[in-house]
Structures are given as C-alpha cells and as structure tokens.
Image (spheres, coloured by chain):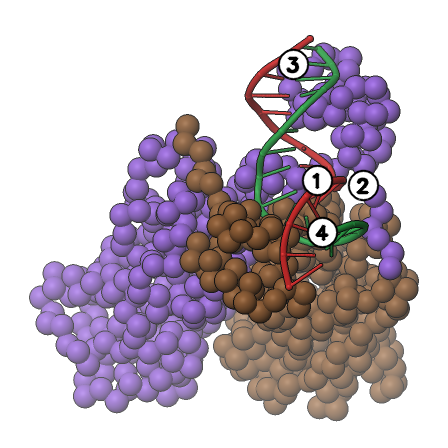
Chain colours: A purple, B brown, C green, D red
Amino acid sequence: MERKKKEVTIYDIAAQLNVSAATVSRALRDDPAVSAPTKKKIFELAEAHGYQANLFARNLRQQQTRTIGVIVPRLNSYFMATVISGIEHLANEAGYNLLISQSSELPEQENAIVKTMFNNRVDGLLVSLAYPTADLQHFKRFSQKHIPVIFFDRTLENNIFTNIRIDNQQAGYDATRHLLELGRRRILHVSVSHTHNIYRDRFNGYAQALQEFHIPLDRNYLYLDDLSLEAGARAARHALELPERPDGIFVANDNCAAGCMMALKKAGIRIPEDIALVGFNDDPVCQIVEPNLTSIHYPAYEMGKMAAHHLFRQLAADEALRTTKVVGLRAELVVRGSSG
Amino acid sequence: MERKKKEVTIYDIAAQLNVSAATVSRALRDDPAVSAPTKKKIFELAEAHGYQANLFARNLRQQQTRTIGVIVPRLNSYFMATVISGIEHLANEAGYNLLISQSSELPEQENAIVKTMFNNRVDGLLVSLAYPTADLQHFKRFSQKHIPVIFFDRTLENNIFTNIRIDNQQAGYDATRHLLELGRRRILHVSVSHTHNIYRDRFNGYAQALQEFHIPLDRNYLYLDDLSLEAGARAARHALELPERPDGIFVANDNCAAGCMMALKKAGIRIPEDIALVGFNDDPVCQIVEPNLTSIHYPAYEMGKMAAHHLFRQLAADEALRTTKVVGLRAELVVRGSSG
DNA sequence: TTGTATGCGTTATCAT
DNA sequence: ATGATAACGCATACAA
C-alpha cells in the first residue's frame, strides 16, 4: 500500500545547509538569536522546498493546538451564521482554527461534543447552549484544566465562565413598551416553553412594561410553544380564540413571528391596524414579510467578535487575571410596518 | 506562570500495572493480541484516571488527523446549513472532526483557507466553490499528495476530483417547462452574472424548454445580477420596463425570487395571474412569501451525506481505486401558489 | 550565534 | 501474549 510521501522537515533543511535542526527551527520562528544571513538562507531553502511545519509535532511539544471549539444549537439561522462570521474574523487574524459543531438543541449531543472538543485539546471554547441545558456540569473538565470557556447568547448564570449577552429584559421591555405607546393594551407574548433564561428575561421585560402601564398580567396572554414557523400559526389561532382579541403581539423570534403574521392575515386580520406585531432578532425575514416586521436588532456579528475577543484575552492572560464577568451588548428596536 | 497539569499517559498506566506501555496502547485500541484479563485491568485503570489519548502524539505517529475540512461560500443560507448537517451526521458516525470555513465568495479567501487546511493536514476536503473561482489550481497540492477532495453543489469540471451535484440543466428545464405548460410565453430568467457553471446549466435548461415550445431566445429576457434580495427588486424593475411585460419569471434562487415578488406586488402586479414565479432551492422562505413560492427542491441534507460518504470511501480505498466520477442527485419541482 | 540532547505521547517493528 | 525500542517532527534547556 502506497505510503504518504515523505514531508520536508527541519532536519532536511538543516542537513542541506550544514546547520543544526535547532537553528532551522529558530530561524523559521524568526528568533532574533539567529543571524540575518543564516536566517535568509534557511527561509529561502524552506520556501524552495515548500516546507510546511508539522503542527502535530509542534502541538505535541507545546501542548496547545491553536484551535478553538465553537458549539451552537443550530447552524441554520441567519443569526448564528452571522455570529460565526464574527468569530471567524477574529480567529483568522489571530491564526486560530475553528472547530464548529451543532448540538441540534440536544443536551446529550452537546455533552458529546464538549467531550470530543476536550479530547481534541481545543485551546478554548465558545458556546451557545441548547435550550434544555440546565447546568454546566459537562464544562467542568474545562474549568478543572483552566481552559477558558465563553458563553454567548444562550448563557447560564455561573461564576466561573464569561457570559456575553444582550440585555434580554431591556429588549423585551422595549418591544412591549413600543406596542403600549402605540395604544395597544391587550398584548400577547409568544415565546418558548423550556424556560431558558433569555426567554424568561424577555418575558420579564414584557411584564415590566405592562406593569408600568398598569396593565395586569394575564396568563391567557402568554403563549408558549417552540418558536418555529408552525408555532407561529398555532399562536395566531390561540390569539383569535381568546375572549378578548389581542391588539398587539410580541413574539420572541422573527421566524415564529412570520408564521404568526401569515396565519393572522389568512384569518382576515389586518396588520398593524387590528394587531400590531413585534419580533426579535432582526433576521432578513423581517424585510420579506408584509408588512415588514418590527423587531429587536440583535448585534450578532459584534457578539461573535466579542466572544472571540474575550477568549483570546483569557488565553493570553495569566490564570489569575481571568476575572469572571458578564459582557453586555446593546440590542435596539427597529420599527417597521408591522407596528406602523 | 502556571503550567498545564500533567496528563495521564499510557506510561503512567503501564507503570501502575507493571506492564509495558506497548501493552497498554494495544489494550486501549482493543487489539486481540492482548489477553482479556490484562485488557480489563487496563481499561479499568484508564477509566479511573480519566485517561485521554493524546491525539497529537497519535497523529504525529500515524500521519493522519481524522479531521476533514469543509469549505463553503457562505454559512448563512438555509441550504448550506442543511448540507453541513448532512456532512456532520456521517462524520460523527465515522469519528471524524469537521474544520469548517467560509470563503465569503472570495477566491483569494478560498485560496487562503485551502492552504490553512492543508497545513492542518486534514485527511480530506469537502468544498463548494466561491462564485468567481474559475480554476482548481489551489487544490493541486491536495492532488499531488493524493489527499481526496470532493466538490459539491458549486463544482467545476475536472478529471481528478469527484463532483456531487444535481442536474441543473434538468432543473432549469423543469422550472421553465412548468411555466410554459401554464401557458406563459414571455419568460424572464433571473440569474447571476459570474457565469458559474451551475447557473449556466440552469440557463441551458431554460433555453432548452423555450426551444421545445418554439419560443425564440431573447436577450432582454435574461437578467443577470447577484441573486440577492435587492437584486430581486432590480430584476422586477427590469421586468416592468420591458416593452412586452413577462408573464413568467424563473429566478435562480429563492431569496432573490422573494425580493422580486415583493417588488412586483408593490408595483401592483398580481402573482400568479399577471406574472407566475418560480424560484430555486426550496428554502423556508418559499412558505413565507405570499403567495407561496414554487421552487426546485434541492436535496441539501442528502447532498451533505453523499459528499461525506464518498470522501470516506476514498479515504478507505486504495489510491488506484479512486475512480473520478460525478454523482448526480435528483432535484424536483414543488408547485405552490406563485405559479398556481 | 549556534549546536547537542532530550522530551512531548503514541504506535509499529521486531524480539522474546 | 508481552516487552524493548525506535521513530514521528518540533522546541527548548543547556552547553559551547
């Protein structure tokens, strides 16, 4: 069976130049201890041979991979794609590779991925948690070995790892208050049943705004499902079956809001006249549905860059200097036709 | 500065059990040459220590990484996310890791990524090319070292690597013929200006269908832009400025078709009565626009699995058995309201 | 400024 | 069935 062709190593270069492998190694890493002429010769020969450093050997020696793991619930949302672009941007600059995996919203899957990433000796982890993930046990092996983990978007309260997130309560408040200022008084909130804290926070913002306007919280005006397109249709049905029809709906993501809008329109409801609608994320779909969807603009790209930025900082810093913290990003309301 | 804690190695286990490291290594890999009792002892102690194989050492020794590189133009489409899910599915099963990167449709970026992946010694590559990429020069280093590369979706004719794709001409034909059978006669085709072959093929299918219906090809009925949402609006404007308004439009992707539909509706055009519309890909957006968009269903998940499948086959096979080939997948028309 | 020697943790070859 | 030993390619402590 044909073996792989032999690679050019620093030894080959050293032999041809009558210097030691150590010198070649140093020259290639631009060590100032090597004289300019030798360095030049070495660079040239390396170039001529198309020399490639063997990263395993280097990693084996240095105990680091220059690889960071990224774990997200799903790759198929505009939001996540944008976050990852942000991460990539910084990672490329810093010469790090990305190992990307999706948990498909399954904690067991997430757990398996974390283990794999650990075995692959990633230098750090960037994670957005699956819905149902309720604790951070599976990241313990990382904290034990002092490998930094940064959570973004879907975070969990903890005092070990850094969290990057928006102020979901504020955003929920802004969305709801906007509807209230439009004169709407019966506002339905559509969200997800697994009470992940970001959705709880959005709800809290909703509740806070209602309270400010002296509107009592009514359990009937909270509809929990899975935030899919279909869930949006179900939410619409729920809305129409309510004894007093809502005049405003705040949906915790755009996709679901789009489904809701379509179902409402099909039922003859006018948007925004009869019911005003606000979504969340500011996905491109906002500009496709008619009327265009008012939403909370989520700074996805920036969040990706932030997450990577903090990871690299922690990688560079001494263990002791890694102060646990929460980084907040601004998320702003974008008003469009659905709440004209 | 605090060093990383020492890892448990096969030597540690060997020492504690009074066997050699070689035996431990064999046992851990379940080599039949090791007796059952020793194996058991070794497994137990390894488990107790939370032993983790050091992949660098293994890779260094075996000259392989069990990592495959995935390069896509963009991560932010439903289509790509689905393909990647398909790839992941098989890769996980086979115990391979995925290194995912996006070229952002930039050949230079693509080139850089290919180089990085090469340096990282990926065992194989799964690639969907950037629009403007016109040749496969940058993959030469892979063919030279006999590292398999599989192209999917955006492929380029070649006699070295395997291509996985749908029959774009057939699909373009199906889409156009559908409009023709609806009685439409002035059919505009909206596509992308960089003539990547998949778009050329779709156009050819369009031309073929017209020919069958004895309709002469008219350059005015071909609009080339970048297939973005905005390009869709521009295409609509173009359509309305034509001396004879089209009664059917075949757009080469759904996103652009959605933009086109919106602009047409805004201009007072009724869909499908005045103009029938067909998109491409069968993205979720098809079910969001009104009326729902007729499209070509692209078997994305299956394509991902196919690509991974063929890569693993080539990895397992002897060099000589790697017959270059093209794998075709079926793409079928899904009729919806936009061409009711 | 350069060289020597050694370790990083595995696996494969050859003995026993 | 098991052991001794030599790579794999690089980086570094120490010596010169």
Q: Which mark is residue B175?
A: none
Choose the circle earlier in sequence order: 2 or 3: 2
Q: Which mark is residue A33?
A: 3
| Secondary structure type for disc 2 | loop
The three-letter code of the residue at mark 4 reads Gln
Q: Residues within 10 Å of mark 4 (few under 14, many from 20)?
A: few
Residue B218: image quadrant is: bottom right
What is the CA distance from the residue labelled 1 to the residue labelled 3?
A: 22 Å
| Quarter of the image with the N terminus of chain A in it | bottom right
Q: Position of residue B103 (x, y in %)?
A: 66, 51
* A203 relative position to B135: left or right: left
Mark 4 — on which chain does it sit? B
Q: Position of residue A254 (x, y in %)?
A: 41, 68
Q: Which residue is mark 2?
A: A7
Q: Which residue is mark 4?
A: B62
What is the CA distance from the residue labelled 4 to the residue labelled 2?
A: 13 Å
